[in-house]
Image (cartoon, rainbow, N blue to C red):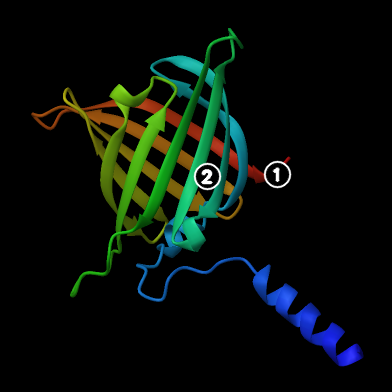
Amino acid sequence: MIEKLCVAAALLAASSAAPAAEPAATPVPASVRALSGCWEGRGEVMGKAVAVAISAYPIVGDAMVAVEAASSAIADPEDQYAAHLILGGGGKQPNKAAEPIVGYWADSFGGAFAASARGESRADGFDMTYQYPDNAYVNRWRIAGDRLTWEIVARSKGGVQKPFAKYALRKGACR
């Protein structure tokens, strides 16, 4: 009887283990995995001061990372924004030190404003570029210990860059 209980317990433990990425899955770059956890801070979006919170966690069997971002204007807490980002490895390319990253952006403006992205890892974070009809939005994520900076610049088709948003966050406990 005890042997049967031990076998049943072992089978139950094995079946409840977190799913792992498929063996052939492209690994998520370490620079993206470093976002895992919860972050809070402040920033500025198009000249407007905002409070921002980010939660990042593995999804789809640990093959990608989801990033949930929510912000509200400091001067008007009813002025809120939310974004859902999905990030994953783009496949290691020979003779390149940087790891390619693929991504998708969806936000509270709805499906017409969703966009896919390409980017690459860096020693201190990663960059992602989301292409829209009017501009490309370059997202620069930089991580140093428990601090995160996230800068977004709008780049015109002519290559002119303008600041769009910049956030400074600290890692904290997830609620």
Where residue 158 sits: x, y (%)?
A: 8, 29
**Quadrant of res 156:** top left
In the depicted structure, whether residue 29 falls above or below residue 69? below
Check disc 2 and give the amino acid type.
Leu
Q: Residue furthest left?
A: 158
Q: Image quarter for residue 122?
A: bottom left
Residue 174 numbered mark, or none = 1
Q: Position of residue 159 (x, y in %)?
A: 12, 32
151 or 54, which is in the foreground? 54
Q: Nearer the viewer, residue 10 or 49?
A: 10
| Front one among 18 and 138 | 18
Instruction: Judge left or right: residue 87 versus residue 51.
Output: left
Type of amino acid under label 1: Cys
Mark carried by residue 148: 2
Which is in the foreground here, disc 1 or disc 2?
1
x 66%, y 71%: residue: 15
* Secondary element at tag 2: strand
Q: Specify the farthest residue to the bottom.
A: 3
Cα–Cα gap, marks 1 and 2: 16 Å
